[in-house]
Amino acid sequence: MILFGDTTPMPTPTMTVDPDSVTPGFVGFGLMVVLVAVVILLVWDMNRRIRRVRYREEIRDELDAEQAAAEAASDDSDDSPRS
C-alpha cells in the first residue's frame, strides 16, 4: 500500500557520453578563427567600397556644380549688350 506522504527516490543522472568526445576541440577552434577572419575581411572590404561610392558622389556633385556655374557664366556673357 502506497501512502501520499511517502517520498519516491529520484534517480541520479549518470554521464553516458565521454565529455572529451563532445567538445569542439582544435577543429572547432580553427573554424571559429577562420570565420572571424573572414568576417573582419568582409567588413573591411565593405567599408572601402562604401567610402569609394561616397567619394565618387562628392566628385560628381562638384563637377555638376562647376558645369552649372560655367553654363551660368556663358549665359551671362551671351545676354550682355553688344556695342
Image: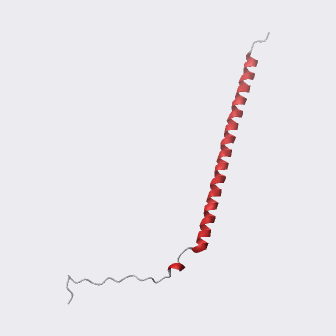
Q: Is residue 13 above or below residue 79?
A: below
The residue most toward the right is: 83
In depth, the one of 51 and 75 nearer the eye is 51
The residue most toward the top is: 83
- Image coordinates of residue 20 in percent, x first then y, are 53, 79
- Image coordinates of residue 69 in percent, x first then y, are 71, 26
Q: Quadrant of residue 83?
A: top right
Residue 25 appears left or right of 65: left
Q: Is residue 70 above or below residue 32?
A: above
- Image coordinates of residue 60 in percent, x first then y, are 70, 37
Q: Quadrant of residue 55?
A: top right
Residue 27 appears left or right of 59: left
Q: Quadrant of residue 67?
A: top right
- The residue at the point 75 percent across, 18 percent down is 77
In which quadrant is the N terminus drawn?
A: bottom left
Q: Colour scheme of this structure image?
A: secondary structure
- The residue at the point 74 percent across, 26 percent down is 70
Number of numbered discs overlaid on the protein picture? 0
- The residue at the point 27 percent across, 84 percent down is 8
- The residue at the point 65 percent across, 53 percent down is 44
Q: Is residue 51 above or below residue 64?
A: below
- Image coordinates of residue 68 in percent, x first then y, are 70, 28
In depth, the one of 57 and 16 nearer the eye is 16
